[in-house]
Amino acid sequence: MKEYAEVDRAQWMSIQEARVKIIPAQMELITELAALMHCATDQ
């Protein structure tokens, strides 16, 4: 059985808000998702 890190909280937010709240190591994830969703990627 695979184990996954515990998730403490989930929340819907805009791409811009996510960029403010996400840890720097995960910024590329937000950028890639925004590109896939054809969202504005202004930083």
Image (cartoon, rainbow, N blue to C red):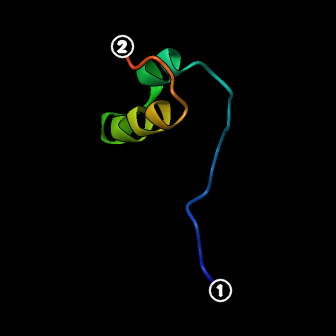
Which residue does the numbered mark 1 point to in the structure image?
1
Residue that lies at the very extreme toward the bottom in this rendered image: 1
Q: Please tell me how many numbered marks the rendered image carries.
A: 2
Element assignment for label 2: loop
For image coordinates 36% across by 13% down, the residue present is 42
Q: Residue at x 39, y 32 (%)?
A: 31
**Callout 1: 10 Å neighbours few (<14), some, many (20+)?**
few
In the picture of the structure, the residue carrying the numbered disc 2 is 42
Image quadrant occupied by the C terminus = top left
User: Where is residue 5, by image quadrant?
Assistant: bottom right
Mark 2 or mark 1: which comes first in sequence? 1
Count residues near mark 2 (Cα–Cα under 10 Å), then give few for <14, some for 14-19, many for 20+: few
* Image spot of residue 40 (x, y percent): 45, 17
The answer to whether residue 10 is above or below residue 4 is: above
On the picture, is 8 further left or further right than 25?
right
Q: Residue at 42% x, 23% y: name it.
A: 19
Viewer-proximal residue among 5 and 24 = 24
Residue closer to the observer: 37 or 22: 37
Q: Position of residue 36 (x, y in %)?
A: 50, 38
Residue type, numbered disc 1: Met
Relative depth, front residue between 43 and 40? 40
Residue 28 placement (x, y as % from top left): 34, 39
**Label 1 secondary element:** loop
In the rendered view, tell whether residue 6 sits above or below residue 18: below
